[in-house]
Amino acid sequence: MKSAKKIINALVASSLVLLSTTASAAMYQFQFLANPDALDPVQDKSMDVLHTVTIDSSKFAQFNSTTLSETENWLNGGINLTMSHQGKSVSFNSGINVNSPTVSVVGSYRDEGFISLHGGGPWFFAMEFAPGNPFIDGNNLPYDPFVYGFLFSYQDSTAYKDFSSLWIYGNTSILSKYEVSAVPESSSWALAAMGLMTCLIAARQKKAK
């Protein structure tokens, strides 16, 4: 009887730990628009590109601009970027140069297709592509060829401001607004542990009767 009680207590403790992990390891999603003319007084709205950035927080020890720019974290599922334009969506991750230490897209002119991720203001999350980049041209994504292919995010977007605040200043207090789901692995283990705990309790009650 004592050993059964110890097992139950251990399962309760482990379940609490797993549930606690689930609460802190979640999926977050930010959506904001970008446009080659986003910094100008007038924009051609037909060139708007919707950026959907999904972050799996379980892949990171901490959030900052350095970890965001590391290719490894884009390849392991930690960060995913989908760009939608004129009814078509493409994955930025599918064009990443796996040999580059910082996230960049393979291009015809060296590897000059990358995201500027450091610093504040309009340069924080600006796309920069060399003219003729096959990923951009092949997916019909707009950029301004007169400014070396820049694609700027609109600065007045709340989601953009929060995303910038998270990665530049480590402001994790905004994350709750963008949580889309808990990371499944931890929750699955927690539910399994709690299920086993319930079975053991039921068996113990039956034996007591």
Image (tube, rainbow, N blue to C red):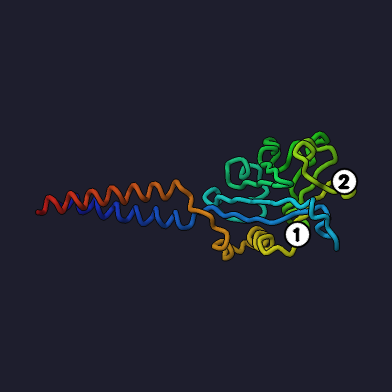
Q: Is residue 157 above or below residue 54?
A: below
Percent position of residue 81, x then y? 65, 47
Residue 84 visible to the viewer? yes
Residue 102 visible to the viewer? no
Q: Nearer the viewer, residue 68 or 193?
A: 193
Residue at image mark 2: 145
Mark carried by residue 13: none
Q: For residue 45, what is the image quadrant?
A: bottom right
The residue shown at (84%, 37%) is 132
92 vs 113, left or right, is: left
Percent position of residue 62, x then y? 57, 55
Mark carried by residue 154: 1
Q: Nearer the viewer, residue 46 or 109?
A: 46
As measured in the structure, the alpha-carbon distance from the residue carrying label 2 to the one carrying label 1 is 19 Å
Q: Secondary structure at mark 2?
A: helix
Q: Is residue 184 above or below residue 174?
A: above
